[in-house]
Image: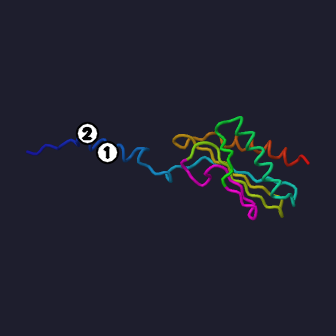
Amino acid sequence: MLTPRLPSAATLFLAMLASGGCAMSDSAHAVPEASRTLKIAPQTPTGRVFECARKRLAQLGEEEALWDHKVTREDMQHGVLETGNFPENNVSGFRLHLQHDPESGSVSLRLRGAGAYFVDQGVEAGLKTFEEGFTQCLATP
């Protein structure tokens, strides 16, 4: 008579590891992200928009360790400014993507903010905090 064999401890461990978070790829997780489009005065120079973004990012970087205020991409022709390694998923802290369209007077903002295990670091509140100082700067002549 045959008796059923129980899986060995090693087999159980490998099965648990394969089904657990350790074996999952970054693409299986959604990076917390908030976005908003602001309306500013049409024909505002992109240089001015970037200047205000840099100023606000520097302030936030001094106040809050989560903010990656180092600008890593600046494309005046396309009106794009990014901080940190914005396209990457597995990065902790806040990273900003800003796109300015001077013709329409719009500024599109995207803030990513993942922590360990892709926990939301408060991207909605973070974007609002960025926006407050940023729009104040733009309103100042």
Give the colouring mode of the picture: rainbow
Asked whether residue 31 is drawn in magenta, I would say: no
Q: Amino acid at mark 1?
A: Leu
Report the magenta stretch's main SS.
Answer: loop
Q: In the visual, does 15 lie left or right of 57?
A: left
Q: Residue furthest top?
A: 63
Q: Position of residue 103 (x, y in %)?
A: 83, 64
The residue that mark 2 highlights is: 9
**In which quadrant will I find the N terminus?**
top left
- Circle 2: element type: helix
Q: In the visual, does 133 lie left or right of 13?
A: right
Asked if residue 78 is positioned above or below residue 109 in the image, the reply reads: below
Asked whether residue 81 is drawn in magenta, I would say: yes
Q: Position of residue 37 (x, y in %)?
A: 76, 54
Residue plotted at (72% across, 39% down):
60
Bounds of the magenta segment: 73-90
Q: Position of residue 86 (x, y in %)?
A: 62, 52
Q: In the visual, does 84 lie left or right of 12?
A: right
- Circle 1: element type: helix
Q: Residues within 10 Å of mark 2 (few under 14, many from 20)?
A: few
Q: Position of residue 101 (x, y in %)?
A: 79, 61
Asked if residue 13 is positioned above or below residue 77 in the image, the reply reads: above
Is 2 in front, or is 52? 52
The residue that mark 1 highlights is: 14
Residues tagged 1 and 2 counted as in contact (Cβ below 8 A): no
Is 7 in front, or is 25? 25
- Disc 1 to disc 2, how far (Cα)? 9 Å
Q: Amino acid at mark 2?
A: Ala
Residue plotted at (31% across, 41% down):
13
